Amino acid sequence: MNMENARMNSETAGANAHLVSSATEHFDVLIVGAGISGIGCAHHLRRQLPGTSFVILDEQESFGGTWITHKYPGIRSDSDLHTFGYSFKPWVGPPIATAAEILSYMNEVIEENGLTPHIRYKHRILSARWSSEINLWTLEGEMADTGERATFTASFLWMCQGYYRHSAGYTPDWPGIKDFAGPVVHPQRWPDDLDLSGKRVIVIGSGATAATLIPNLANQCAHVTMLQRSPTYFRIGRNVIELAEELRRLQIDETLIHEIVRRKKLFEQYAFSKRCLAEPEQVKKELISQIVAVLGPNYDVATHFTPRYSPMQQRLAFVPDADMFLGIKSGKASVVTDEIERFTKQGILLKSGKTLEADIIVSATGFNLCVLGDIDFAIDGKPLHFSETVTYRGMMFTGIPNMVWVFGYFRASWTLRIDLVAEFVCRLLKHMKDKGATRVEVALRPEDRNMRLLSWIDPNIFNPGYLMRNMHLFPKRADKPEWQHSQDYWTEKDAIPAINLGDVPFVYS
């Protein structure tokens, strides 16, 4: 399925959205977000609970979430698509895919599952109110382009909106930033008319976004410099999976290839994760040696590519075919490890006293996190303070009835958790129907009352800056497995399907 069909699909749904009347519409399930999570969950809902009425609301003008928000040069996945893709939909392209390839894949899922009539684009949700008197959610929204109001009620609310604010990325308030004569661009809002030819570009940051931008900008501008405060771990590998190609040569069905390669990748990721915990110094040595092999023994890898933290404390960025490092080796790109003193008219003054001159500065400095889509939530007339709740396995939250939030993995493909959570939700909805229940929530048990409450993610396990800045906005966890958001897919793949829906944490009425 090509991108022209994807565009027509989204335009059709967008046109339908304008036909929505101001009258309240009711659905059994309301899904917030038409990104990778929302589309995947809608598939499971249609397959497992046929006849369930549902709608997907999204503020943007098309499906895709992060893959249409970001339009910077070369945008691509940093997870392999055999695990980032859905379990139910074979991936047939290269493991590291472009945004266009991912959107085309998602469009096929939408068409094959008849999801287009269920999606309402350009719908900005303003508020969500739960009423225990009628056991319903009422959502008030407006059309993003016209301001026309829309009201929906739903028996169950499925939050698939992700965790960062799509309207603007995070840019620190650097001293003198307004003094710089050129544009300061965030990758989340890349200008369509940005002219890079002959320009000197500085990219601030060293994560997956910077690793994608550097080789692409190097081919368009005079020179690009990656300015980082501290180094990041990278993995280098070919953008091909030999096993998949061999199976295709043998004319094996793509569905079977997808399953085999998916299992292979998951096994390899599990083994690598265990090694990172068991022998972090050896893994660190191996990762850095890959870079030395490309840049050569005379490059200062110790300064620019030797991180101060353990390999699994932040997400590893994959560099396909070593393209970023080849750009550095060619001289088209360079790396500076230093801190910013202030911006100047010509560029950036560093704390070392060195000045980097630039025509364009790119702030690849991460996200602004938001919880529950910046929607104004209330439970029975009282404002919901999400940070005062306790999470049940990163899906449900104490004091919030009939709601599940999809929050994926950081150190494995986000999408792996979509399948697990979707299976759980469908099983929960069926269980409620069988019981004749119209309400479910999780509540602390007597033995949980004195639990020590902790931050959403253990910073000793995972601690990127964008998460640490906003940890206070997130629900609490505890030291018991059921009351925390695990980042361990290999444990959750067995634990979540085994959840006993009749157990004490679940309260039905």
Image (cartoon, rainbow, N blue to C red):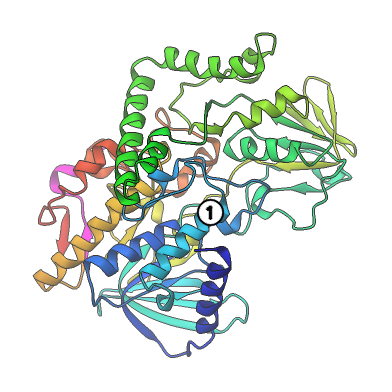
Q: Residue furthest front?
A: 250
Q: Nearer the viewer, residue 52 or 292?
A: 292
Q: Residue furthest top?
A: 297
* Up-down relation of residue 266 to residue 497 (above or below): above
Residue 448 sits inside the magenta stretch:
yes
Secondary structure of the residue carrying numbered label 1? helix
Determine the residue positioned at 57% across, 45% down.
76
In the image, the segment drawn in magenta is 440-451
Quadrant where the C terminus sits is: bottom left
Determine the residue positioned at 20% across, 42% down.
494
Q: Nearer the viewer, residue 506 or 86?
A: 86
Horizontal relation, residue 237 to residue 357: left or right: left
* Up-down relation of residue 497 to residue 19 (above or below): above
Residue 34 visible here:
no
Determine the residue positioned at 44% across, 45% down.
81
- Residue located beneath label 1 in the image: 101
User: Quick one: label 1, few (<14), some, or many (20+) residues within 10 Å?
Assistant: some
Identified by mark 1, the residue type is Glu
Determine the residue positioned at 70% across, 53% down.
190
Residue 68 sits inside the magenta stretch:
no
In which image quadrant can residue 135 be found?
A: bottom left
Position of residue 278 measured from the top left corner of the image (x, y, whole percent):
33, 17
Position of residue 296 measured from the top left corner of the image (x, y, whole percent):
66, 13
Residue 114 visible here:
yes
Horizontal relation, residue 491 to residue 81: left or right: left
Q: Nearer the viewer, residue 322 or 399?
A: 322
Position of residue 380 measured from the top left corner of the image (x, y, whole percent):
32, 72
Position of residue 505 measured from the top left corner of the image (x, y, whole percent):
17, 53
* Up-down relation of residue 17 to residue 451 (above or below): below
